Amino acid sequence: MKKSIQEIRAEAELPLDLSQLPIRVTLDIPYCIDGNPAHTLDIALPAQGAGPFPAVVFIHGGGFYYGYKHNVHTAPAWNTIPAAGFALVSIDYRLTPEAPWPAQIYDCKAAIRFLREHGSEYGLDPQRIGVWGNSAGGLLAAVLASTGDAPAYEDQSMGCPNQSSAVQAACVWYGIYDIPNLQHHWSRILKSGESPEQEDYDALGALINAPGHDRAAMAAFASAALHVHSEMPPMLLFHGTADHVVPYLQSVEFFERYLQKNNHNQIHLSLLEDAPHGGPAFTEPENLKLVSDFFRKWLIDSGKQPETQK
């Protein structure tokens, strides 16, 4: 039986039992010195090996208003990334009850800059950083991929201002890429009598409701599809065709925009037939293998040594 939104939110408060995983873990590392518990990250290294390990930064979902870095919904990342020979870095960020956009992307970029400056102290290779996000975290992962070191998306007062926040690869599960066209996408795919799933909280409305700023401008600012350029990192996209929270056309049209400006062999879109917003279809072994193989290809096998010092 399908879980209700209320059940999913309650489940998202449950911590993942990390003691059962074959990892070496350090929890609650501050990536900003302001003392805000939202500005912390967890690092999990593979059980064996001296490193340094390429890092995959995981950004949790939750509609921008719930969830945290090692709740039960983050299990796919905790189970998959260290087992594949990478360091997992799972981050928290400010949620909308605390601050609207662009606080969330400021936080993600501050975390990347922190890893560039201090990652080697924790066994990471700061030259090789990928990102993986689902749902709300998928929006943030896509914006990280599409903005590089664009100053408008940085709050360098949060620390490590001389470091790059660009990522070398990005995986997005059922993400939002184009807020202004969200309703248009719904109108194209919903059948007569159908409607998107509704929450008791306007997640995107709260996200772009920055005091003193135009909501339409904030919606465009938070939309990776509107910032695609010719030097994007490789990307792997997943979306379910029966997703009634985020229309799968968000991923399809982003994929098409990426192809217009970038190398075709650097992006892959996997549409999961009849899959909803999340769920077991995404965590099938073959799909998790696609994720780990993608990061291995672009963070290890490519042999690239990107310039990450500004």
Image: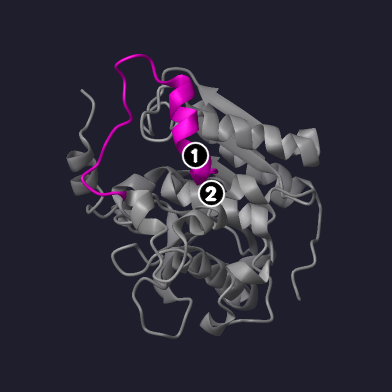
The residue carrying pointer 2 sits among few (fewer than 14), some (14 to 19) or many (20 or more) residues within 10 Å by Cα, namely many
- The circle drawn on residue 173 is 1
Question: Reading the chain from its start, which is encountered first: label 2 or label 1?
Answer: 2
Q: Look at 42% across and 49% down and name the residue there.
A: 136
Q: Look at 53% across and 27% down and name the residue there.
A: 286
- Residue 198 is a magenta residue: yes
Looking at the rendering, which quadrant does residue 64 occupy? Answer: bottom left
Measured in 3D between alpha carbons, the distance from the residue under mark 2 to the one under mark 1, in whole angstroms, is: 8 Å
Q: Is residue 47 visible?
A: no
- Along the horizontal axis of the image, is 119 left or right of 82? right
Kind of residue indicated by mark 1: Trp
Kind of residue indicated by mark 2: Trp
Disc 2 and disc 1 in contact, CB within 8 angstroms: yes
**Up-down: is 300 above or below 286?**
below
Nearest the viewer among 78 and 150 is: 150
Would you name the residue on which mark 2 appears? 132
Nearest the viewer among 58 and 88 is: 58
Which span is picked out in magenta?
A: 176-202
Q: Look at 70% across and 51% down and name the residue there.
A: 299
- Along the horizontal axis of the image, is 276 left or right of 53? left
Q: Residue furthest top?
A: 192
Quadrant location, the C terminus: bottom right
| Residue 156: % across, % down | 59, 80
Q: Look at 55% across and 84% down and name the residue there.
A: 157
* SS type, badge 1: strand
